[in-house]
Image (spheres, grey):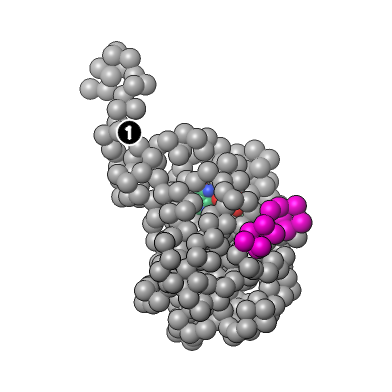
Amino acid sequence: MGYNLLKGKRGIIFGALNDMSIAWKVAELAHQQGATFTLSNTHVACRMGSVTDLAEKTGSEVIPADATNISDLENVINKSTEVLGGKIDFILHSIGMSLNVRKKRPYHDLDYNYLNKTLDISAISFHKLIQTAFKADAMNEWGSIVGLSYIAAQRSLYGYNDMADAKSLLESIARSFGYIYGREKKVRINTVSQSPTVTTAGSGVKGIDGLIDFSERMSPLGNADAEDCANYCLTLFSDLTRKVTMQNLYHDGGFSNMGMSLRAMKQYNKSFDSDDVNDLY
Ligand SMILES: NC(=O)c1ccc[n+]([C@@H]2O[C@H](COP(=O)([O-])OP(=O)(O)OC[C@H]3O[C@@H](n4cnc5c(N)ncnc54)[C@H](O)[C@@H]3O)[C@@H](O)[C@H]2O)c1
């Protein structure tokens, strides 16, 4: 639906890898809503991936960057203001990666070099990106920066591993920098805590299918998919949410406030034979 919600706004979208990516959906929908933007991803992802298809579709330029590298980020920020013809109104940070998860190192046997990489790529890059934009004075007043999080930042969820620590840090950065950027430039910074979603990054999480089924049963509205998430991000980029900042906003069909649902209870009870159920009392 075209409401022209982002008409005239300029943005940078990080993290569109393929058409399952949350950032991909954000780009498609932001384009529909009248925004112009650049796309960024790692050099490898830009070479190998289908980012150029998305760029063609949305009339955007691709500017490769390793989000942990400051000079790459400076280049993205500078080139984006040049290409788009002015300061930036919105930035999406849709970036996450854990080598411990990839290499199947459990949380009680972490490789600390990998942990440093997880934190750098998935959380500190958020700070680096915001600081780079701040120093270059690249954002318009009332601009909006959004990062993507997950409820494992607050609660232990089996299999999420060191990404949980990265998400806690990501959310903290949104609060800490949100205060400064809001005070100095009226720029807002929030994180969206999204339902588990079938994407390339999501598929790496141990037991993701069970997790998706569990939260689907637990959430009164069901899981939010990538497109739902993109729509929510657009509201945060729009002028309709000008006073929302420093928040971690749950976008999860109600999951975060549930303890037990009827649908989950029914499934849970199926795992007991009658003797086991009696043992409960
Ligand atoms: N999929 C889920 O279940 C889920 C749930 C909640 C939050 N999230 C978060 O959403 C965000 C987007 O993930 P997604 O699910 O769309 O998966 P995705 O795999 O499509 O996106 C992750 C992106 O991070 C990029 N990336 C990795 N290392 C990078 C680096 N050094 N520099 C720049 N980019 C880099 C990848 O190339 C990829 O485009 C991530 O922050 C993820 O943690 C995902």
Q: Nearer the viewer, residue 227 or 185?
A: 227
User: Could you say where residue 112 lies in the image, as x and y percent from the top left?
Assistant: 67, 50
Q: Is residue 52 magenta?
A: yes
Report the residue at 51% width, 79% height from top. 8
User: Could you say where residue 10 lies in the image, as x and y percent from the top left?
Assistant: 55, 76
Report the residue at 37% width, 21% height from top. 271
User: Could you say where residue 118 lies in the image, as x and y percent from the top left?
Assistant: 63, 54
Callout 1: SS: helix
Q: Is residue 69 left or right of residue 192?
A: right
- The residue carrying pointer 1 sits among few (fewer than 14), some (14 to 19) or many (20 or more) residues within 10 Å by Cα, namely some
- Where does label 1 land, which residue? 264
Q: Nearer the viewer, residue 184 or 237?
A: 237
Q: Is residue 86 magenta?
A: no
Report the residue at 41% width, 49% height from top. 224
Figure check: 254 above or below 86: above
User: Could you say where residue 1 lies in the image, as x and y percent from the top left?
Assistant: 42, 61
Label 1 amino acid?
A: Ala
Picture quadrant where residue 41 is located: bottom right
Image: magenta residue range: 45-57
> Ligand 1, what quadrant?
bottom right
Question: Magenta residues: mostly which secondary structure?
Answer: helix
Evaluate whether residue 246 shows in this view: no
Report the residue at 50% width, 71% height from top. 34
- Mark 1 beta carbon near ligand 1 (under 8 Å): no
Locate the C terminus by quadrant.
Answer: top left
From this viewpoint, which residue is outermost toward the left? 281
Q: Nearer the viewer, residue 278 or 200?
A: 200
Q: Is residue 131 left or right of residue 43?
A: left
Figure check: 156 above or below 28: above
